[in-house]
Image: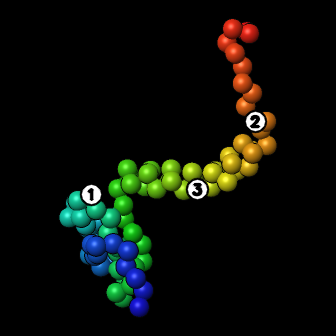
Amino acid sequence: METILATKTTSISEFKANPAAAVKKAGKEPFAVLTNNKPSFYVIEPELFEALSELYFEMQATPLIKKRLARLQKAVSVDIDDL
């Protein structure tokens, strides 16, 4: 059995009949659209999608940033009066 990663669900038939009503019924919570009691896809609000996209970007970028920072020379102490 496939795990459903949402607390709310709707059938594909109900979703196709009135997608706007399904979204309104879920409020701001994500929900799974099921076909034969298995998740076909998930519906999430734009703000959550944006947050997930940002997290994904950060996960992809972090190793590259760490690698580049490791190449930089170490910081040098400078006395402001010497400038």
Mark 3 vs mark 2, CA separation in Å = 25 Å
Label 1 SS: loop
Quarter of the picture containing the N terminus is bottom left
Residue 21 visible, this angle? no
Q: Quarter-wise, where is residue 23 in the image?
A: bottom left
Between disc 1 and disc 2, the foreground one is: 2
| Image mark for residue 3 | none
Tag 3 residue: 59
Seen from the viewer's position, the closer of residues 8 and 33 is 8
Give the crowd class for mark 3: few <14, some 14-19, many >=20 residues within 10 Å: few
Residue displayed at 50% across by 50% down: 54
Seen from the viewer's position, the closer of residues 38 and 58 is 58
- Is 62 situated left or right of 5 in this image? right
**Vertical comparison of 77 with 49: above or below:** above
Tag 1 residue: 28
Seen from the viewer's position, the closer of residues 80 and 3 is 80
Q: How many marks?
A: 3
**Vertical comparison of 16 with 79: above or below:** below
Q: Quarter-wise, where is residue 11 in the image?
A: bottom left
Q: Position of residue 4 (x, y in %)?
A: 37, 79
Mark 3 vs mark 1, CA separation in Å = 25 Å
Q: Amino acid at mark 3?
A: Met
Disc 3 + disc 2, Cβ < 8 Å? no
